[in-house]
C-alpha cells in the first residue's frame, strides 16, 4: 500500500495512553470546554443555506440507508467497515442488502484531534479508496455527517471544510450535500430524519433551533421521525441526569408538537452496539465504525428516559427501556477486559516509558533520603515531595472525578487515591530493594547507569501491570471503563446499521456485526472505476447482531 498511489498514508490505531497524546488531548479538551462558547461556529452557520433535504421521491418508493459512527482511527478497522459499506450489496443469512443510497456518519469522523491532514489520512482517504467513483449505472449515494466531540476540537473548522462545501462536494463516490453541521431529511414512507449538533453537550443554539422549526413545519401527524444525536445521552444520563436535557428539549418543543412520533434515536460515541427499547421507541447506540472497542458488560439492564432526577420541570414523561441487545455480548466483553495486562504495555510503549521514569525518579529520591539517616523529617525532601505530589495528582486526574453534584463522585476520588498510593508503595518496595543491593554504593555514575538501563524498564513494566490491575478492578465499579478498553486498542468487533424503508412505510433496521476485521489487503488495479482499490485477501464475514428490528 504505497501512500503515493493511494493518495494518503494509512495510519496505525491511536495509542490512547501515549503521554504526549494524553497531554495534548487533555489540554485541547480543557481549552474547548473553557473557550468553546467563544469559538462556537454554530452561531455563524446562520448565514449558510438553511434548506432541508428531500429524498422522499424514489422510483419504487423505497430507500436504503447506512449508518456508521466513530470511524476515523486505524486504517485496517476503518477500511474494513468502509469496504463493506462500499459494496453493491451484502448477503447476510441469505438476504441481500443493497448499499445505502444515503450514508449517515454519526460523529467522530477523525481521531484523536480534528485537522485537515487527520481527516485525509484517517477518514477521507480510506473511504475514497473503498468507493473511488459512483457506479456509472446508479445515482451517486449521498453522505451526511454529524460532528462528534473529536470533530469539535478545532472549533469545527476542518469538519465544515470537508462536509459542507458549496460546490462539487464529494468523498470518493459519495457526494456531500449538507451546508451546516446539522440537517433534516425527508425520507420515503412518511419518515423524517433530524440530526442535531451538540457542542460538547452544550445548549442547542438558536440558528439550529430555527432551522429545525422551519423543517418541522413540513412534518405531518402521520410522519415518523429518526433522531440522530452525537452521543447516546440516554445511557449517560444514568450518571448525569442533566446531560439528556438538550435532546428532550428538541423532542418536546419542536418534534412532538408536529404530531409525528419520534420512533428511533440513534447515536455513536460509545464504541459498541447496544439497543434499549419499549413499544414506542428504539434507543440505539452503534459506534463500531473503526475506533477501539468499548465494553458492554457494565451497561445498565434498563434505563429511565428522561431520568427522574433531572431538574427540568417541563420534561417529557419518563419511560423505562429494557436492554434488548448488545455487541459484543456480556461474557465476551468481560473476557476482553482481561487482555489489559498484555495489550496496554505492547500497544502503549510511551506509557510504559513514562511510568518507568516516574518510578525510577521516585525510587532514587526515596533511596537518597533514606540513605542520609537521621530523623523521619529527612524523608520529606523536596525531590521526594515533588514526585509524590506528581504521582498522587496524576492518579487522581486519571480517575477523572466528576463534579461534586454527580453520583459516584467520592468513588472516583477513592479509586484515584488508592491507585496513587499503590504506585508509591511500588516505589517504596523498589527503594528498599535498591538499598539492599550493592549497586547503590558504586562510584558515580554507576548507580545512575544501572537505574536507567535496568530499573527504568523493569519498573515501567511492573508499574504498567499495576495500572492494568487498577483499570480492571476500577472498571467493575464503572470507573475508567473507557481507559480500560482504550488502552487495549481492540480493532475487532465492529458494527454498522443498514436501514430499509419499504413503500408502505415499514422501517427495518439491520444491525450488522464484524467479529474480525481484515489486516491484509490486495490491490485491485484492474477493477472498474467504482471498484475498491484494495480488497481483503480473505473474505470479511458479517452477520446480524440480532434479528432485524421492524418499526412501523
Image (tube, helix red, strand yellow):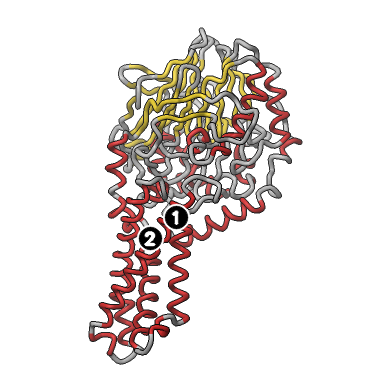
Q: Residue at x 60, y 42 (%)?
A: 159
Mark 1 to mark 2 CA distance (whole Å):
9 Å
* Relative image position of residue 402 (x, y in whole percent): 52, 50
Name above or below for residue 249 compared with residue 31: above
The answer, for residue 266, to whether it is visible in the render is yes
Callout 2: helix, strand or loop? helix
Identify which residue is drawn at 44% across, 27% down.
276
Residues under numbered marks 1 and 2 in contact, where contact means CB atoms less than 8 Å apart: yes
Mark 2 nearby-residue class (10 Å; few <14, some 14–19, many ≥20): many
Q: Front-most of 178 and 287? A: 287
Q: Of the numbered discs in the image, which one, if any, rests on residue 111?
A: none
Q: Residue at x 73, y 34 (%)?
A: 207
- Pointer 1 or 2: first along the chain: 1
User: Is residue 13 something one can see in this rendering?
Assistant: no
Q: Which residue is mark 1?
A: 399
Circle 1 crowding by C-alpha within 10 Å: few under 14, some 14–19, many from 20: many
Residue occupying the far right of the picture: 47
Residue 166 locus on image (x, y percent): 68, 34
Q: Is residue 255 above or below residue 436?
A: above
The residue at the far top in this view is: 504
181 relative to 371 in the view: left or right:
right
Tell me where residue 205 appears, x and y as whole percent.
70, 37
Residue 156: % across, % down: 63, 44
Image quarter of residue 216: top right
Residue 330 occupies which quadrant of the picture?
top left
Position of 490 compared to 235: left or right? Answer: left
Front residue (pair 429, 232): 429
Instruction: Point out the residue furthest to the bottom here.
Output: 443
The one nearer the camera, 311 or 27, is 311
Which residue bears the numbered disc 2? 419
Amino acid at each position: 500500500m504505497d501512500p503515493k498511489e493511494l493518495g494518503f498514508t494509512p495510519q496505525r490505531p491511536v495509542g490512547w495512553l501515549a503521554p504526549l497524546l494524553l497531554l495534548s488531548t487533555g489540554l485541547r479538551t480543557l481549552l474547548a470546554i473553557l473557550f468553546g462558547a467563544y469559538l462556537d461556529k454554530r452561531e455563524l452557520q446562520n448565514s449558510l443555506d438553511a434548506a432541508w433535504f428531500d429524498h422522499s421521491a424514489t422510483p419504487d418508493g423505497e430507500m436504503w440507508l447506512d449508518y456508521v459512527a466513530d470511524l476515523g482511527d486505524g486504517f485496517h478497522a476503518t477500511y474494513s467497515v468502509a469496504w463493506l459499506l462500499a459494496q453493491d450489496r451484502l448477503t447476510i443469512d441469505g438476504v441481500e442488502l443493497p448499499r445505502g443510497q444515503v450514508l449517515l456518519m454519526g460523529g467522530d469522523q477523525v481521531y484523536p484531534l480534528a485537522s485537515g491532514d487527520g481527516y485525509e489520512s484517517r477518514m477521507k482517504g480510506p473511504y475514497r479508496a473503498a468507493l473511488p467513483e459512483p457506479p456509472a449505472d446508479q445515482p451517486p449515494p449521498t453522505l451526511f455527517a454529524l460532528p462528534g466531540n473529536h470533530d469539535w476540537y478545532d472549533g469545527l473548522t476542518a469538519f465544515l471544510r470537508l462536509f459542507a462545501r458549496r460546490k462539487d462536494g464529494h468523498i470518493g463516490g459519495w457526494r456531500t450535500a449538507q451546508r451546516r453541521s446539522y440537517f433534516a431529511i425527508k425520507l420515503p414512507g412518511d419518515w423524517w430524519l433530524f440530526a442535531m449538533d451538540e457542542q460538547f453537550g452544550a445548549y442547542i443554539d438558536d440558528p439550529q433551533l430555527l432551522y429545525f422549526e422551519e423543517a418541522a413545519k413540513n412534518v405531518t401527524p402521520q410522519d415518523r421521525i429518526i433522531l440522530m444525536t452525537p452521543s447516546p445521552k440516554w445511557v449517560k444520563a444514568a450518571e448525569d441526569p442533566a446531560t439528556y436535557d438538550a435532546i428532550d428539549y428538541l423532542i418536546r418543543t419542536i418534534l412532538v408538537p408536529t404530531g409525528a412520533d419520534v420512533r428511533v434515536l440513534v447515536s455513536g460515541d460509545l464504541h459498541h452496539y447496544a439497543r434499549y427499547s419499549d413499544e414506542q421507541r428504539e434507543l440505539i447506540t452503534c459506534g463500531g465504525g473503526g475506533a477501539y472497542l468499548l465494553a458492554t458488560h457494565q451497561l445498565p439492564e434498563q434505563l429511565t428516559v428522561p431520568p427522574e432526577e433531572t431538574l427540568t420541570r417541563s420534561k417529557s414523561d419518563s419511560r423505562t427501556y429494557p436492554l434488548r441487545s448488545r455487541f459484543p455480548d456480556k461474557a465476551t466483553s468481560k473476557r476482553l477486559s482481561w487482555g489489559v495486562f498484555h495489550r496496554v504495555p505492547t500497544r502503549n510503549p510511551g506509557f510504559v516509558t513514562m511510568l518507568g521514569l516516574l518510578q525510577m525518579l521516585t525510587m532514587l529520591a526515596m533511596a537518597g533520603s533514606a540513605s542520609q539517616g537521621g530523623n523521619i523529617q529527612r524523608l520529606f525532601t523536596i525531590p521526594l515531595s515533588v514526585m509524590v505530589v506528581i504521582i498522587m495528582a496524576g492518579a487522581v486526574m486519571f480517575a477523572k472525578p466528576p463534579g461534586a453534584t454527580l453520583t459516584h463522585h467520592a468513588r472516583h476520588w477513592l479509586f484515584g487515591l488508592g491507585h496513587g498510593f499503590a504506585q508509591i508503595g511500588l516505589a517504596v518496595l523498589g527503594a528498599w530493594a535498591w538499598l539492599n543491593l550493592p549497586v547503590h554504593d558504586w562510584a558515580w555514575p554507576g548507580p545512575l547507569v544501572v537505574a536507567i538501563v535496568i530499573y527504568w524498564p523493569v519498573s515501567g513494566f511492573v508499574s504498567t501491570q499495576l495500572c492494568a490491575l487498577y483499570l480492571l478492578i476500577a472498571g467493575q465499579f464503572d470507573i475508567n471503563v473507557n481507559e480500560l478498553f482504550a488502552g487495549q486498542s481492540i480493532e475487532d468487533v465492529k458494527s454498522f446499521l443498514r436501514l430499509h424503508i419499504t413503500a408502505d412505510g415499514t422501517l427495518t433496521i439491520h444491525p450488522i456485526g464484524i467479529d474480525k476485521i481484515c489486516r491484509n489487503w490486495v490491490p485491485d488495479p484492474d477493477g472498474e472505476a467504482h471498484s475498491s482499490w484494495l480488497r481483503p485477501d480473505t473474505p470479511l464475514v458479517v452477520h446480524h447482531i440480532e434479528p432485524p428490528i421492524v418499526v412501523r
